[in-house]
Amino acid sequence: MKQHAEITYDGIDENADYNKLINKVIEKCFENEHLDRLKLYICITLTVPEVIHLINKKYRDVDRATDVLSFPMFEKNEIDAMVKDAVENDEKVQDCDFEDCDILGDLIISIPKVYEQAEEYGHSFERELSYMCVHGF
């Protein structure tokens, strides 16, 4: 099965449970949007608030940390046209390495913020991380 998320870590330790959950959620996102028919992947960086703060300031002129950042590489109408073409031609992608695919975009998630918000909203870390993935997607 094709993997749709390239997960990297910046400022936190790699975690197999995070990887498993994120891949499951992103797979569903790709399926629901019919993006699994395209040679695309999303790059997800799990990090700390200080890194998100710097990225926010540099690229968005926002001088604070946020929970998630999303930087798409395509406009919505471009993706819609690509999906329509793939569906009409009944194209299916079985497998491709990240080097052979185009990047859908970058998603940056603050893991400490995920823990904080899960506690604040009274639900599990897993639910909040899943929400951040879908929200950013």
Image (cartoon, grey):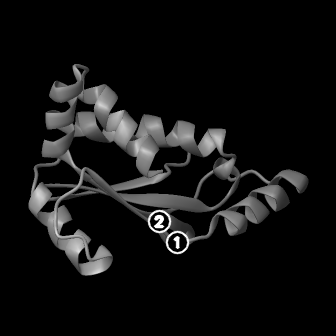
Look at 62% across and 69% down and name the residue there. Answer: 75
Q: Amino acid at mark 1?
A: Met
Q: Quadrant of residue 96?
A: bottom right
Left or right of 91? Residue 11 is left
Distance between mark 1 and mark 2 Cα atoms: 5 Å
Q: Quadrant of residue 30?
A: top right
* Quadrant (top left, top right, bottom left, bottom right) of the N terminus: top right
Look at 25% across and 33% down and name the residue there. Answer: 17
- Residue 15 percent across, percent down from the top left: 19, 41
Give the vertical position of 10 relative to 123 (above or below). below
Left or right of 82? Residue 26 is left
Kind of element beneath mark 2: strand
Question: Among all residues in the image, which is located at the extreme right?
Answer: 88
Foreground: 44 or 74? 74
Give the vertical position of 74 relative to 26 (above or below). below
Kind of element beneath mark 1: loop
The first of marks 1 and 2 along the sequence is 1
Using the image, tell me which numbered label, if any, was put on residue 73.
Answer: 1
Q: Are marks 1 and 2 in contact (CB under 8 Å)?
A: yes
Q: Quadrant of residue 50?
A: bottom left
| Number of residues whose C-alpha sits closer than 10 Å to that of mark 1, classed few (under 14), some (14–19) or many (20 or more) | some
- Residue 68 percent across, percent down from the top left: 30, 53
Question: Among all residues in the image, which is located at the extreme bottom?
Answer: 58
Using the image, tell me which numbered label, if any, was put on residue 105.
Answer: 2
Q: Amino acid at mark 2?
A: Gly
Using the image, tell me which numbered label, if any, was put on residue 23.
Answer: none
Foreground: 57 or 132? 57
- Residue 4 percent across, percent down from the top left: 50, 51
Left or right of 101? Residue 35 is right
Foreground: 61 or 102? 61
- Residue 124 percent across, percent down from the top left: 24, 22
Look at 25% across and 50% down and name the residue there. Answer: 67
